[in-house]
Image (cartoon, rainbow, N blue to C red):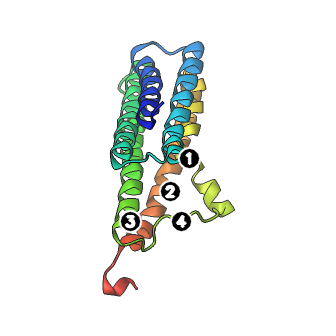
Amino acid sequence: MTPNGVTAISAGFSLTGILLVGALPRSVPLGILVALLLAVGYAFDSADGQLARLRGSGAPSGEWLDHVVDCAKITALHLAVLLGVHRTFGDSAVSLLPMLFLLVANMLFFTFVLTDQLKRNQGGRGATKDEPASTLRSIVVIPTDYGLLCVVFVLWGLPNAFVAVYGLLLLGSLGYLVLGLPKWFRDVDLSPDAA
């Protein structure tokens, strides 16, 4: 199996779960199925890069494909939630949650990818290091974890519980983004005043 093949499998599981969220009425069994599909898709998404490293076959095209699939998955998932929330709650303010989460999730993803790329282009200056994460940082990033978002779909059949937990993840992700943006800007700032 190739890394790109693993990416395709990941996309298939994720897309199936996302389509079910957007197309079918809410139910507890559907929520469990969606959570499983998204979690399996996420596991395969984590495996493609590992496989490329193990095989020594990592290529820019594989990284590109992985990022394109990730961006599509993030966007489509929150749009599917928007459809489901609208079916359940109508034209209420609850529909604003997935719209805002879509914005925050895409900004986080794009900022992470761009910051990493700019650091690499700066000749390794400040490139992503395998430093042990502090306990505080580990806690602060929890709401941004896609794996946790996958698990939250077990609540899909319980609309009020899902919206409450989804909203908490949104608030945590928004807080992380707001706190992180100034740091990430400084990480890539090469102006003389930045030193």
Among numbered discs 2 and 3, the one appearing first in the sequence: 3
Helix, strand or loop for disc 2: helix
Disc 2 marks a residue whose amino acid type is Tyr
Check contact, mark 1 vs mark 2: CB within 8 A.
Answer: yes
Q: Which mark is residue 176?
A: 2
Give residue 5's position: percent from left, percent from top: 43, 30
Q: Residue at x 65, y 61 (%)?
A: 136
Disc 1 marks a residue whose amino acid type is Pro
The answer to whether residue 92 is visible is no
Disc 4 marks a residue whose amino acid type is Lys
Cα separation between marks 1 and 2: 8 Å
Residue in front for this viewpoint, 195 or 172: 195
Q: Quadrant of residue 95?
A: top left
Point out the frontmost of discs 4 and 1.
4
Q: Quadrant of residue 194?
A: bottom left
Helix, strand or loop for disc 1: helix
Taking 193 as reference, is 24 above or below it?
above
Give residue 135's position: percent from left, percent from top: 68, 61
Helix, strand or loop for disc 3: helix
Q: Which mark is residue 120?
A: 3
Among numbered discs 1 and 3, the one appearing first in the sequence: 3
Cα separation between marks 2 and 4: 20 Å
Residue in front for this viewpoint, 44 or 187: 44
Describe residue 172's horizontal placement relative to residue 16 as left or right: right
Which residue is tagged 4?
129
Residue in front for this viewpoint, 25 or 132: 132
Count of numbered marks = 4
Point out the frontmost of discs 1 and 3.
3
Which residue is tagged 1?
143
Check contact, mark 2 vs mark 3: CB within 8 A.
Answer: no
